[in-house]
Amino acid sequence: MNQPLLDETMEQLAAPYADTAGRAVLETIRAYGVTAVFGIPGTHNLELYRPLGDLGFRAVTTRHEQGAGYGADGWAQQTGLPGVVITTSGPGLQNAMSAIGTAFCESRPLIVLSPGVALGAEFSDVGTLHETKDASAMVAAIAEWSRRVTSASEAVEAVHDAFALFRTGRPRPVHIEIPLDVLESPADVPADARAARPMPAPARADASAVAEAAALLAAAQSPVIVAGGGSTRAAPQVTALAERLGAPVLTTLNGKGVLDEHHPLSFGSNLRIAAAREVAEAADVLVVLGSKLGEAELWAPSLEARGPVIRIDISPAQVHKNLAATVGLVGDCATVLDDLLAALGDGLPTGAGAPTSPAPGLAAARAAIDAEVAATEPATVALAERIAEAIPADAIVAGDSSQIVYLALASVLRRDRPHGLLYTPTYATLGYGLPAAIGARVAQDDRPVVAVLGDGALMFAVNELATAVEQRLDLTVVCVDNGGYGEIRQNEVDRGIRPIGVELVQPDWAALATAFGATGRRVDRVDDLGDAIREAVAVGGVQLVHVRQPGA
């Protein structure tokens, strides 16, 4: 570019521009504390990108919109704020649909912004670029809500509604579609309307129901706590209740780490294990915190209960779902637990054990759980144990729907706080782990981040290695290669089907990582795996450690 043209271009870039609806929306999101957005710039969404630098956002350009959604998910789990995704219209939005479905099933806060056809052009079917029959209806089918706004003020109001949902209700994805003519027009939205609004006080449960639950627990001899994803903001209260009752705590995978998994009362994220479900079902009072007790988390049709059931949930619709509650407490989990602890009062634990250790029978139950985990898939568990030993104790680990994770690592890896394992147990899509790890690392730089996934899962999102390199992240990826889709291969064999479509051509993984600008490490002996992971984390940058699963 010649100098006069360059000067003219810089003058254009420095010139003031109209206060558009796009800016009003992003200003409002920024006012709530969000500092990063994930997405891909496109022809129609540029007025959403224009204000990002000025407002102090970090723009993370992924190589696919599905990766943007999962990156935003990983970011959200580390910050407690909603992840934000910007897509372009049509295919860009459609590419993010798997991430939107995931956020719905796993109850994760996500805001998706997209442009739409201009007002009056709906359903015109005239062949405009990215034309979509009904984008908002498409997303509404899998999101908590989807709104096509008609003005900048409506778009800003939708942002406020989203944050109110995330603070006071069950967090799930929302979509705001802004017609192109609205997006690019001046915004008649005053500054005070763009400011973050104070949130209502956390919802409290009915006082008489709290008293009824406290009476049940005061009389209990063998209470058990099951903690789900809805309890992750109540970790101190869950710990206090467990110690007050001497009650073991089982968590779902989404609730993993709500009680430090090194705590003597922690039975881990093992509801998928029959011996663990037996512990819960044998309780004389079962306390369920923020979980729908779905089949995907249980690996069983349902969880039964021999005694009374106390359920705490922010959503009234959840209180009797899949297991009827004897006492249902609807409200914010941390606040309800504070009230419940106050009603219980001080004193010795009501259960048979000491405040920080399970009763002898429960210790035997924990041993039975560990034995069942080890016997599930011994070679995979042994490999997962090597990986877990090499991962720093404070690391955030992102997993994928890979056998190394759900058959083994999810159980043997112990985390000391919530969101230490990023995973999608219900939607169980492939391609989640790497972009989620990227989002987690973008959110913070004081804890190591390691992604552990299979070769099939990595291939779903291998392009995001370029994103990690471009963002200059310290991120270690451990690829456990079983030669393709190992579980589906076994499913076919179990049904008497000759394996078809599951034996996959493998790239040279170490060379592929190097081609992306990362560092590729090939581990030929499993005995060397731990050292390779430790060295990769210590060196920093984007590292990929590839190992063949023994016997695969």
Image (cartoon, rainbow, N blue to C red):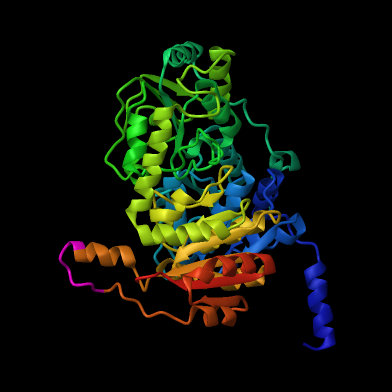
At horizontal 29% and vertical 30% (from top left) the residue drawn is: 304
What percent of the width, then of the height, locates residue 393? Answer: 61, 51
- Mark yes or no: residue 188 visible: no
Of residues 155 and 395, which is closer to you in this image?
A: 395
Of residues 127 and 325, which is closer to you in this image?
A: 325
- Quadrant in which residue 369 is drawn: top left
At horizontal 49% and vertical 65% (from top left) the residue drawn is: 92
Reply above or below: 110 against 530: above
Tell me which segment is drawn in magenta.
494-500
Q: Which of the image's four quarters has the C terminus? A: bottom left
Q: Is residue 544 magenta?
A: no
- Mark yes or no: residue 471 visible: yes
Q: Which of the image's four quarters has the N terminus? A: bottom right
Going by the image, does 287 lie left or right of 451? left
At horizontal 60% and vertical 53% (from top left) the residue drawn is: 75
Q: Main secondary structure of the magenta part?
A: loop
What percent of the width, then of the height, locates residue 444? Answer: 68, 54
Going by the image, does 371 lie left or right of 385? left
Of residues 527 and 524, which is closer to you in this image?
A: 527
Name of the residue lying farthest toward the bottom: 2
Name of the residue lying farthest toward the left: 496
Q: How many marks?
A: 0
Reply above or below: 172 against 316: below
What percent of the width, then of the height, locates residue 19? Answer: 72, 54
Going by the image, does 493 lie left or right of 533? left
Reply above or below: 472 against 55: below
At horizontal 30% and vertical 23% (from top left) the residue drawn is: 306
What percent of the width, then of the height, locates residue 325? Answer: 36, 23
